[in-house]
Image: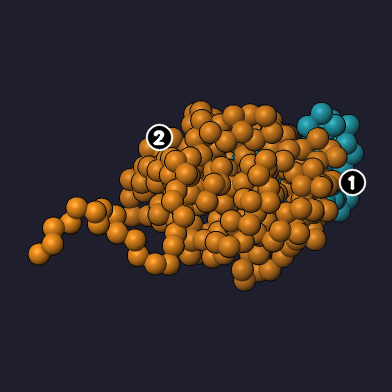
Amino acid sequence: MPTFYGTEIASALMLGTAQYPSPAILADAFRQSNAGIATVSVRREAGGEQAGQDFWRLVSDLNVALLPNTAGCHSVREAVTTAHMARELFNTPWIKLEVIGHADTLQPDPFGLVEAARILTEDGFQVFPYCTEDLVLCDRLVQAGCEVLMPWGAPIGTGLGLNNIYGLRSLRAHFADIPLVVDAGLGLPSQAAHAMELGYDAVLLNTAVAQAGDPATMARAFASAIEAGRAAFTADPMSPRDMAAPSTPVLGKAFL
Amino acid sequence: MKITINGTLTEVAATTLNDVLEETGYGGAKVATAVNEAFVPATLRATHPITEGDRIEIVAPRQGG
């Protein structure tokens, strides 16, 4: 099971809390997923409104670790201030750091990400950076103090799966001792299984479950796939080869 | 005096951040605050002065991915 900043989590599934049809469906999806971490955000609350207060009670009852994010932040200053507000609200040093660099792809701004990660780490945060699979960027994030890396599989909300398997595999090989999480872009359980088969420690997803016709069933499907993928990785899979090799023994075949 | 709360121009009598929260219906709510784009911890709200034209952000826990 993954360990983030010294805390062992009982599940390799990290699940978002946005876009569910209702709070009850969200809670049911979490029960079916056995997710160990829920991602959350901070947003404006109108005076007298109780939306945030109701949501706080809902996620508190999920009995999972909370990972607040800086979603929607496009600058270092925005992300750092949001992280501070999140730390106070959720009483955790964990922060899923997003510094968005491009409005169309929601691709992380690598330069802002490293700078914000350094500032937050120096201020006692434990940073979970939403990044790309760029090896140099990930190296800089580790140098900035990140003890976990969360490369995207594909752009947020696309459901395209693992767009750069070579890059993700390279990260796993290069950062053997750093927990790695595929964050964003997953649409199907098979894609989550693939990430785990690559040796990733966890996957983080939201839309694939929340926007499924039956979120609870999809959550259960992801949980099963992640467990299968992890088991496959630990079982040391065979190496692929180009040429066919018969599995049935040739020796002893009748001459007919 | 007029200040901006979560993007809306608002008339308040309060002169500290804590009193602004009380006056505008956030009393006791689980919220975090920033004034003029700088985080203000809950422990400093009672002494943080608010002046004409200040921009206050008040946020609460919400759904996120």
In the displayed structure image, the side of residue A127 where residue A7 appears, left or right: left
Front-most of B20 and A29?
Answer: A29
Q: What colour denotes chain B?
A: cyan
Residue pictured at 9% horizontal, 64% vertical = A256
Residue under label 2: A31
Report the residue at 36% width, 46% height from top.
A221
Q: Residue A33 appears in which quarter of the rendering?
A: top left
Q: Position of residue B45 (x, y in %)?
A: 82, 33
Task: Give above or below for B29 relative to A40.
Answer: above
Determine which residue is flagged by label 1.
B51
Q: Which dot, 2 or 1, sits closer to the camera?
A: 2
Q: Marks 2 and 1, how far apart in space? A: 47 Å
Instruction: Please indicate, yes or no, whether residue A87 appears anywhere in the rendered image.
Output: no
Q: Quadrant of residue A29?
A: top left
Q: Please, which residue is most extreme toward the front here? A: A255
**Chain identifier of the residue bearing label 1 in the image:** B
Judging from the image, what secondary structure is the residue with disc 2 in? Answer: helix
Q: Disc 1 on helix, strand or loop?
A: loop
The amino acid marked with disc number 2 is Arg
Colour of chain A, in one word, is: orange
Query: Pointers 2 and 1 in contact (CB under 8 A)?
Result: no
Q: Residue furthest bottom?
A: A104
Query: Where in the figure is residue A60, as x and y percent of width and height?
Result: 54, 30
**Picture mark count:** 2
Q: Is residue A169 visible from the viewing direction of this image?
A: yes
Judge whether A242 appears above or below A131 on screen: below
* Residue sitting at x 33%, y 55%: A213
Single out the residue that lies furthest toward the left.
A256
Residue A228 x/y as whole percent: 40, 43
Amino acid at circle 1: Thr
